[in-house]
Amino acid sequence: MTQRKNGLAAFGLAAALLCLTGCKGAKNRPVNVVGSTSVQPFAEVLAQEYEKRNPAERVEVQGGGSTAGLQAAVNGLADIGMCSRSLNEAEAGQFTPITIARDGLAIVVNPANTVDGLSLEQLRGIFSGRIANWEAVGGKGSPIRLIAREEGSGTRESFMHLVMDKDRIPAGAIAQESNGAVKELVKGDPAAIGFMSLGLVGKELKALAIDGAEPTHENVLNGKYKLARPFLFAVKGAPGAGAQKFIDFVLSADAQKMLEDEGLIRAK
Amino acid sequence: MKKDKIIAAILTVTALSAISGLALITIFIFREGMPIILRTGGGEFFLSADWRPRDGSFGIFSMIIGSLAVTAGAMVIGMIFGLGLAIVLTQFAPPSLAAVLKPVVELLAGIPSVVYGFMGVVTLVPLIRNRLGGPGLSVLAASIVLGIMVLPTVTSISVDALQAVPRSFWEGSIALGATRWQTTRMVMLKAARSGIVAAAILGMGRAVGETMAVIMVAGNSIEIPGSILAPTRTLTSNIALEMGYASGAHREALFATGVTLFVIIMILNCVALSVSRRSARERSFR
C-alpha cells in the first residue's frame, strides 16, 4: 500500500514539474535576448527596469557571446541577438542591426604602470609582439604581458578590427574569457596590458589615452578617441510585438540615460 | 509477483535508456569530430601547434601538451598529499582522528570547481607572480589547484585499498620486529599497490577532464609551455572557451578536440578498471 502511495506521489511530482515548465511558456512568452557578454550586464539592467514598468512583460537576458547570440537569433531561439561589434558582410544581410549604444574599447594597465598613453601604432606594436618591453614606450623596464580575449569574442574582434589591422596577436598571449577576468588579472599584474569594455573599467585600472585622446565619453562622442564600437541588438526580419516593445523602450530617452549612467555612450 | 515483474521491466527500461543516451552521445561526438581529423590528416591535427581558427589552421598539439603538463603536475601534488594522507589515516592516526579526517577530505569533492578556480585566481596566482615571476597564470597554478581537487579521489580510494589489506599481513610484519613505517613501506603499500595505482588513474581522469578551474588559472595561451611558470591551454579549456562562437570547421575542430579527450579518458578508465579488477582477483586468491 505504502509503495503504491510512493509511486503515486512520484508520478504526481513529475506531472507537476512538467506542468510547471509547460505552463510557464504558455502564460506569458518572455522576450529572449541572447549574446555578447559585454552587452549582457547593460541589457540586464534595462530588462529589470522594463519589467518594473511593464509588469505583464518578461525579458530574459543570456550571455554566450556575440556570434552565439546572432546564431540564436537566426535559429529563432532568441528574439534579439546582442552583438558587441559591427556585423560582418554575411551577417549584415541576415539581420536588421539596431544600435542601442556605443562603447569605448579601453586599453587598460595596472595603476602602478607609469605609461599614461600610447599611439595607435605603439599599441599595434605591443599587441603584435614587436614591442615586448615597457621601456620601449616610456615605462619602467619590464616585459609586457599581453592579456587578450578568447577567439571569437566580440571585444576581441572589435580590437582586431580597430587596432590590429592585418597583424596577429601572438599565440603566447594570455586569453581570458570575460571582461571581469581581464580586469582581475590586470588589477594584480603591473606588467600586464589588456583591452576591455570602457563601461566596465571601474576605478581600479588605468585606461590609457590613445593618440593623445583620453578615453572619455566626450572624446568617443566627438570622435577624438578612435577605439569605439557599437552595441547592437540584431533581429531577424520583423521583430515580434514583445521584442519591438522592448527595443522601443531601450531606445527611449529614459533608457538611453540609464545606459549613460552605467558608463556607455548613447546611440546618437 | 506480478508487481515484481513490472518493477523489473521499468528498471530495465531506465537502465537501457541511460546506456543508449551514453551511446548516442558517443556517436554524436565522433560523427561531428571525426571528419575534420580525417580531412586534415590526423598528423596535422594532432601534431601541429598552430591553432588559428580564423585562418583555418587547427592543430591541437600545444593543448595536448598543456593537458599532459597540467595533469602530470596535478598528479605529483595529488599523489604526494593524497597517498601521504591515506597512509597516515590508515596506519598512524588513531581511529577516532581518522574517522573525522576522512569525511573531511571527502567533503572537498563537494566544493564546486569554480570556487577552486576563483580561490586560485585571487590567492595562488598573485603569490606565484610575486614570488616566482611570470604571469602567475601558469602550469604550476593549474597543477596546484587540480592537485587539491583530486585529493579526495586519490585519498579515499587509497584508504580503501590499504584497509583491504588483510590484518594478518600487518600483524605478521609487526611480529617479525618491523617498525610501523617499515611495515607500511614494505608490506602494506606493496599489498595495496594495484588499488593505489587505480586511485592515481582515476585522479588523473578527473584532472584531465576538469575545465572551469583550469580556464581560470591556466592563462589559456595557445603555446607549448616553456616552463611551469608559463601559461598554457588544455583540451577542455579550448572547447569551453571557444564553443560559444564556433561554427563550421571551427566547430568540428572543437568536437575533434572532444574526441581526443574522450579517447584519453576512456584509455585511463579502462586501465583503472583492469588494474582494480586485478587487485580484486589477487585478494580473492589469498
Image (cartoon, coloured by chain):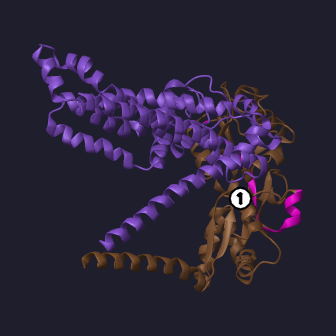
Residue A246 falls in which quadrant of the image? bottom right
Label 1 sits on what residue type?
Ala
Q: Nearer the viewer, residue A15 or B245?
A: A15
Q: Is residue B256 above or below residue A66?
A: above
Q: Nearer the viewer, residue B198 or A237?
A: B198
Identify the residue position indicated by label 1 in the image. A68
Image location of residue B31, percent across then percent down: 69, 49
Q: Is residue A208 visible?
A: no
Q: Is residue A259 visible?
A: yes
Q: Residue at x 76, y 38 (%)?
A: B38
Q: Which chain is purple?
A: B
Residue A222 falls in which quadrant of the image? bottom right
Image location of residue B261, percent across then percent down: 59, 39
Q: Residue at x 69, y 32 (%)?
A: B46
Q: Which chain is brown?
A: A
Indicate the quadrant containing the N terminus of chain A: top left, top right, bottom left or bottom right: bottom left
Residue A168 falls in which quadrant of the image? top right
Provide the residue span drawn in magenta: A89-112
Image location of residue B170, percent across then percent down: 17, 24
Image location of residue B166, percent across then percent down: 19, 29
Q: Residue at x 78, y 51 (%)?
A: B248
Horizontal placement of A104 versus B164: left or right? right
